[in-house]
Amino acid sequence: MSLSDSKNQVDLAFTSNNLRGLAFENAFGGATSFLRRRYTKDLAGVDLAFTGVPFDLGVTNRPGARFGPRAVRIASSLLPFDPPYGWGYSPLESLNVIDYGDLAFDYAKPQDFPAALSAHIAGILAAGVGVISLGGDHFISLPILQAFAQKYGPISLIQFDAHSDTWPDDDLERLDHGTWTYKAVKTGLIDPKTSCLVGIRTHCDDYCGLKIIDAPSIQQRSIDQISQEIKSLVGDRPTYISFDIDALDPAYAPGTGTPVWGGLASWQVAALLRALAGINLVGGDVTEVAPPFDPTGITAIAGAHVATELLCLYGWAKRGG
C-alpha cells in the first residue's frame, strides 16, 4: 500500500477499472460494495460474484435479516487492504470478483420470491460464474440450491447452524427458514449421504440422513479431526457451504433472529473453514445476520469474515491448492 493509494482511491464500487486487486480507500468512507468490488451486472471474465438477498419473511422469531446484506457490505470495508491472514495467497489478486448487487423482488408478493431468487442465481451460474449470497434469512438457501442443482445435480451440503432446519414440511409453497433443509433433501437438491450439519445444538426428531457434527463435539475434538471428517464425507464432489450466523455463540453473533447458547467461537469457525481448503466448493451463502439486534456491529463483522473465507475456499479450489 502506498500513500497515494489511500489518498486517491474512493468509491471503488463504481470507479474501479479492474476486477481484481486489493483496495485501499478509507474504510470509513466511500460506497460500500462487498470488499470494495465493482458493482456490475456484466459477468464477462468474472470468476465469482457476490449478491445480496434482503429477505426475512420466513423467520420464526425476530425479523431483521433483510438488513444483513447492507451491514455485511459495510463491515467488509475493513478487509480488502491485505490478503486474508493464514491462507498463503491473495484471492482478490487471483480472481476476478464482483458485487452483483441485490436481488430485486416485490416484497408484497412473497409467493413470487422463490422463483425470482432461483432465476437470479441460475443466471449467474449460466455464465460460468460462481456465486456467494449474502442473506437474508435461511430460507433463501432453498431457491439458491434449486439453481445449483439444475447445474450440478444433487450436491454436497456443509451447513453451519444452531438448528438443523429439517423440521417436516411437505408444503412446497411455505416460506420457512426452519424447514428448508428438509425440503432440499426431499426434493433431491442435496445428497444427504455426503452432507453434514455443523454446530447443531437444538433437537429435531429427524435429521434427514445428514451427518451431525454438533457444537459439543466440536468443543471436545481438534479442528483437524473435524475437518478431516468433513472432507472425507464430501470428497471431491461439488460442495455448497451454507453458513447461518447463529452457528456462532450469541457472544460472538448477538444480531440474529434465533440465537442459541453453547455455540461455536469465532476462532473455531475461522480455523475450521481454513482447514476445509481443498474441498470442491462451488458456492455458498451467509445468512441470518440481523443488524437491528446488534448495535456493536460484531455480527456483521463475523458475517463479512465468513463470506471472505468462502471466497478463499472457492479460490483455493480454482487454483488447485
Image (cartoon, helix red, strand yellow):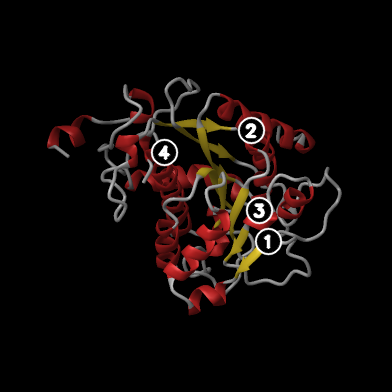
| Name of the residue lying farthest toward the right | 171
- 196 to 44, vertically: above or below: below
How far apart marks 1 and 2 lie (CA) works out to 22 Å
Question: Quick one: SS at disc 3?
Answer: loop
**Reading the chain from its start, which is encountered first: label 3 or label 2?**
3
> Are circles 1 and 2 on residues that touch, CB within 8 Å?
no
Report crowding for label 1: few under 14, some 14 to 19, many 20 or more residues within 10 A (C-alpha). many
State whether residue 263 is above or below residue 32: below
Pointer 2 or 4: first along the chain: 2
Q: Amino acid at mark 4?
A: Lys
Which residue bears the numbered disc 2? 151
Q: Who comes first in sequence, dot 1 or dot 3?
A: 3
Residue picked out by circle 4: 318
Q: Residue 246, position in %: x, y? A: 57, 62
CA separation in Å, label 3 and label 2: 32 Å
Can you identify the residue that label 1 sits on? 210
Q: Quadrant of residue 121?
A: top right
Q: Secondary structure at mark 2?
A: helix
In this view of the protein, can residue 262 be seen by the observer? Answer: no
